[in-house]
Amino acid sequence: MIRIVVVDDHAVVRSGLRLLLEAEKDMKVVGDAGNARDAIFEVRASKPDVVLLDVVMPDESGIEALPKLLHEAPTAKVLMLSMQDDPSYVREAFAAGASGYVLKEAADAEVVAAIREVASGNRYVHPALGARMVAADAAAQEAAASDPLSDREREVLRLLALGHTNQEIAKQLFISVRTAETHRAHIMRKLQLSTRAELVRYAIEHGQLEPTA
């Protein structure tokens, strides 16, 4: 039996989910809550297998509350239920400890299947969202390939190209001289450069001499 706590700030949504889940022979709703604070008490008291957690709630979001819920029930799996279909929300949720992410527009059967999936120790992402995440990751990799430097490395490159020493760069960026030297070494390696003249030419050709935003 999969023991579930439902967390959503809309009472009608909680009631509908309870009816849906308790119609399944292997599921039982052991508690529900309309906000993060009440959810923490419910999870602490019932120690559920799965927490079905709304992302957007008053006072504290589901993603903000997620680590606290897992602290109360470390073995529980958290399935985010959201209207937010932006891949960044999915990544943020997984980074906070979620095991799955399903959209509120999903069919009842998908919600049930997602709960079983995370309860079994697997991850679940709404298929359309998964495809968008793959596309976004590919775009990010392509951007990284065309400009392999981090924001900090671009700033160090600019200062180097303007003729500043490692000591001067360290002072301007409030970093140690060793860190400035490390950034310089990484820049030279990433850009496959060997001399300051090459570095200056690269900075000019790629418009890196203007201050970063």
Image: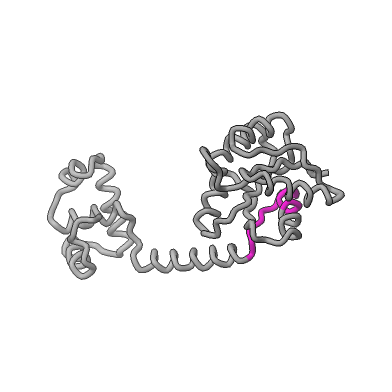
Instruction: Locate residue 143: give its quadrant.
Output: bottom left
Does residue 129 appear left or right of residue 13 in this picture? left
Q: Residue at x 69, y 47 (%)?
A: 12
| Furthest residue in direction left, as rendered | 163
165 displayed left or right of 59: left
Residue shown at the point (25%, 55%) measured from the top left = 213
Q: Could you say which is closer to the camera, residue 186 or residue 39? A: 39
Asked whether residue 123 is drawn in magenta, I would say yes
156 relative to 44 in the view: left or right: left
Magenta stretch, residue numbers: 115-127
| Residue 189 image point, x, y percent | 32, 59
Residue toward you, 176 or 185: 176
Q: Is residue 201 depicted above or below 79 in this figure?
A: below
- Please give the name of the residue rendered at 76% of the width and 52% of the height, measured from the top-left corner: 116
Queried whether the magenta region covers residue 51, the answer comes back as no
Question: Which corner quadrant holds the N terminus?
Answer: top right
The quadrant in which residue 171 appears is top left
Q: Is residue 182 left or right of residue 170?
A: right
Q: How many numbered discs?
A: 0
State the image coordinates of residue 121 (x, y, percent, origin top left): 71, 49
Closest to the observer, 172 or 49: 49
User: Where 31 falls versus 188 (above or below)?
Assistant: above
Figure coloring: one colour
The location of residue 81, given as percent across then percent down, is 63, 51
Question: Which residue ends up furthest to the front in the rendered image?
Answer: 12
- Locate residue 25, reporting x and y percent: 87, 49
Task: Name the residue located 59 percent from the left edge and 33 percent from the top edge.
Answer: 37
